[in-house]
Image (cartoon, rainbow, N blue to C red):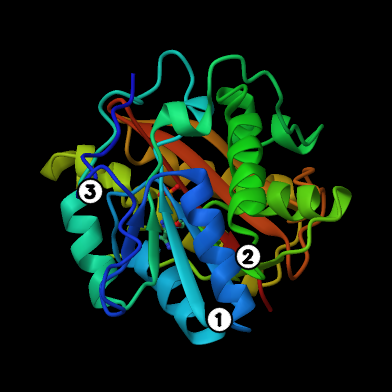
Amino acid sequence: MTKNPSPVGTADQTDAPRNHPQILTTIPGIRAASRAARGARQRIGLVPTMGALHEGHLSLVRAAKAQTDFVIVTIFVNPLQFGPKEDLSKYPRTFERDCALLEKEGVDVIFAPSVEEMYPGGAVTFVHVEGLSDRLDGVSRPGHFRGVTTVVSKLFHIAEPDQAFFGQKDAAQVAIIKRMVRDLDMAVEIVVCPIVREPDGLAMSSRNAYLDATQRKQGLVLSRVLKRVEDLFHQGERDARLLIFAGQEVLRSEPEVRPDYLSIVDPDSLEPVEQASPGSLAAVAAYVGTTRLIDNAILRH
Ligand code: AMP
């Protein structure tokens, strides 16, 4: 079971000085902080994360700081979005370091609830976005997106943000959350931030920490696959089958990397397209050892 990430003190620290983020662990605590900020006419920005923060996460925090007045970052390793054979228990947890990073960014509140706080005994209500949740990552991770949409909708209800910030890195997640917000009339604007990469092209991910040096190099094949697809698209190729074929050839150049999917889809419906067009989403997922990596690119002129 996930442990509460050793919060600094067990009680909510509502009297922390303004330049330190308050660390809140209870739902009434975060709701009160958010409502107080709203009462002071501040716009509230929410950045949901599972912690083990890197520059990708911090880019969302910076966008939230730039666009809103009161920034809440959540750190919660959500058991509901992990399958029974997935990495819930070994998912990296670096709470103290995360807090230090968020303090530097000038975040107002860190919300780090326990699993029990978020899912009290008897919780049987879920939010499920039909169809989309079974595409891309949803194929090999059944139930994953139901876990994501359930926790994100809970966070929206709890924190009542004006804007919530998500990374394009998880392109399917973005499409699914946008659809949920639209379908359920949630009063929050979804802001999508670009993928942050390592200098060599590897998309930043908390799971990159699992990779040894050899696997780290092998993982670069995902961005090479996308580069190949993008190059062909620039050259005028529009046949999605041919684009995928060319990408798969690049994937095969790393035989140790086990492909999950390489697809070209409509970025909103996540349905495969036959003809790629500007705005189509090229998305790839593959296993390097036991680590599952994902990456994507929006095709442009
Ligand atoms: P996670 O902690 O993996 O749940 O990610 C929290 C948020 O950070 C999600 O909206 C992710 O899409 C976003 N994110 C993760 N990695 C990156 C990245 N390399 N670039 C941009 N956003 C990212």
The amino acid beneath tag 2 is: Pro
- Left or right of 124 on screen, residue 79: left
Which residue is found at the position 36% from the left and 49% from the top? 221
Q: Quadrant of residue 258?
A: top left
Q: Which residue is mark 1?
A: 68
Front-most of residues 22 and 107 = 22
Q: Which residue is mark 3?
A: 95
The disc at residue 207 is none
Mark found first going from the N terminus, 1 or 2? 1
The amino acid beneath tag 3 is: Phe
Residue 197: % across, % down: 35, 66
Q: Which residue is mark 2?
A: 161
Q: Residue furthest front?
A: 15
Q: Is residue 239 above or below residue 161?
A: above
Mark found first going from the N terminus, 2 or 3? 3
Front-most of residues 156 and 138 = 156
Residue 205: % across, % down: 34, 51
Helix, strand or loop at mark 2: loop
The amino acid beneath tag 1 is: Thr
